[in-house]
Amino acid sequence: MIARIGRALGTGWRLLREWSGDAAYETYLARPHAGPRISREAFYLDSLQRRYRGPSRCC
Amino acid sequence: MKRLFSKLAWLVVALVGAGALGAIALSRGEPVNGLFFVLAAGGTYLVAYRFYSAFIAARVLALDGTRATPAERLDDGRDFVPTNKWVVLGHHFAAIAGPGPLVGPTLAAQFGYLPGTLWLVAGAVLGGCVQDFVILFFSLRRDGRSLGQIARDEVGRRAGMLTMVSVLAIMIILLAVVALVVVNALKHSPWGAFTLAMTIPIALLMGVYMRYLRPGRVMEASAIGLALVLFAVVAGQWVAHSPSWAPVFTLTGPALALVVIVYGFAASALPVWLLLAPRDYLSAFIKVGVVLALALGILLVRPTLHMPPLTRFIDGSGPVFAGALFPFCFITIACGAISGFHALISSGTTPKLLTRESDARLVGYGSMLMESFVGVMAMVAACALEPGVYFAINSPAGIVGATAEEAARTISGWGFALDPATMDRLAASVGEQTLLNRTGGAPSLAVGMAHIFSGSIGGERLLGIWYHFAIMFEALFILTVLDAGTRVGRFMVQELAGRYVPAIARTGSWTSTLVTSGVIVAAWGYFLYQGVLDPLGGINSLWPLFGIANQILASVALVVATTILLKMGRTRYVWITLVPMAWLVTVTLTGASQKLFHDDPRIGFLSQARVLEQRIADGSVPEAKLAETRHVIFNNRLDAFVTGFFALLILLLLAEAASQWYRILAGKRSAGTTETPYVRSRWAEGSS
């Protein structure tokens, strides 16, 4: 029972990190990718630029 | 046996929903409990999701779980990223749920709780959810292309251009009206103004943290930001009681409008990591938390609604905004029932994240149901107030008077009892100087939410803290919309103007950034300032204008969707988008014509301009007010022009689409769509 609760909390935490963007760089690193990887800082700035180029928040 | 049990369970859900709907619709004379609204909305949503969305998914769109989505085919770990469907649902919901579903229902409560609630529920399941779902699906099948690009590819080049222009125009009105809501909520409120002002340095601190100290650590920075914001809410009361600090944060409407305009310019021009992004992260966490807390609060407190199901103001004489139930209830509540802006989100980031095509149903249809539920909760919070209090907060001084005695006399004359001392006591209990004439919906919603929250935690003692927490929550994510919208508007101006002056298209150029930010801020800032100076409170003219604009964008999305359904050969199912489109076109064109030509000067822009001109000609306007009156006349004509422009946009698009539909149905045009070819998903095993 405790193990199941622990697993559920772990899944919830993972989904929360994905939702908030906290895990975005780890997701990026885990992808098969040709060429050099950009740094965490460069990835963060790049993701913000792309995110706020189009309508991202509604009324 | 299992099937029988399932059918019985769905029958129970349907009966509970229908019973609760019947209870709130047929109740006369006795107060209704807010719990009925939760059951009515929840039951309807569950049935609609289980059956109607499944019908659309299977029969109309034929979602294919074996088909690779853009996130899979174009996976680059940046724009296109296969993402867990619950995470995408959270993303999409956080993106579509803004101040609209909170403010619209609060304003529409002047008609009584019934019309707005029915429209929120029916409009969402038959219109809003369908729009979000089908546009998401069409974008998924077109590499995640935007609504404007889909309109150009599927309807025609003119349609693409019309969509882009309408998005820009809507953005300007949207930003003006949400800024006006913030100004009306924070004027003469040192506690509220201080709390919101503190969110700026807090966001800057978070920005520096995520940029230099711990790059990309969103959760850590948001936790720090959240703690500081909560402290700022509490500290606001010390500022409000400080003889030296309170005057600094006690601002008039025009002064606050100028502050918001300068802030909007800075947010658009500054690097995105410094202010916009951290505020957005903070806002998203607080938004989701407060929505969940409000739902829990309604279930725990089970507030009684004091507003009648229908008020006398369905005839159009309402003090909150002028205009009859039809069409203005359906324009006032856009977000929460159907919002064209959602189509931009459904064809923006979301289609680039979905791992499976079949998840489009959960994300597109499901998240709009959640937004509709937010609207229903806002309606409950507004209608839980005594109607006299609701009208005293939401009516402009020009209608109910500027003192508690005058307001009590006027509102009691409408049949809603109000003791002048009640308003003074209420203002004191939430730590405000006054709650009279606080138009815009945010303060009355905050009072309603504070009552629900304090009923769960803290009681009357914490009413002031909860009120200012609610104000901070509303203002925080309104400013997020303002920041993000101004920035997107700037890019659109750069793109449009860059076609003629290439230097402007350079987004990295500081000159271009400053000039285009100035253009977009000046555009919405003008409408904001006009709203602040409007003797009828601004909301009366700007909110319907915003509603018309937003519903016209929804009509655009549904026109595009109808065209694609015809091209796909789904003619027999075309009613799923055609019926809501026809309803919205009828509502918006009726609303637009009334805002243009209605004889009542509180409704018709041109009529008000004529009446004021006549007053000047009669010499009944004092010399000192002449310039201001001429400004109001000009603004009414400008609003009339904007309304006419929106109406013309949808008529042009309809003409363009109708000729396409005729050619498709008559077989004179190839019905080919620009759908990307089928590629089998690597996750297809076990899918159908």
Image (cartoon, coloured by chain):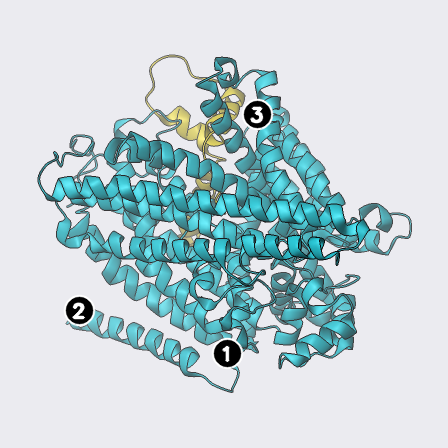
Chain colours: A yellow, B cyan
Disc 1 crowd, CA 10 A, few/some/many (<14, 14-19, 20+)? some
Q: Nearer the viewer, mark 1 or mark 3?
A: 3
- Residue B559 is left or right of residue B271, and the answer is left
Relative to A4, say whether B378 is above or below.
below
Give me the C-alpha separation between circle 1 and circle 3.
Answer: 50 Å
Q: Quadrant of residue B120?
A: bottom left
Give me the C-alpha separation between circle 3 and circle 2.
Answer: 62 Å
**Residue B234 versus residue A51: which sits nearer the camera?**
A51
Name which residue type carries label 1: Asn
- Residue B341 is left or right of residue B380, and the answer is left
Label 1 sits on residue: B33
Dot 3: element:
helix
Name which residue type carries label 2: Lys
Label 2 sits on residue: B2
Marked residue nearer the N-terminal end (3 or 2): 2
Instruction: Farthest residue to the front: give it.
Output: B618
Across and down, in percent, residue B140 comes to 27, 37
Label 3 sits on residue: B516
Name which residue type carries label 3: Thr
Q: Quadrant of residue B318?
A: bottom right
Dot 1: element:
strand
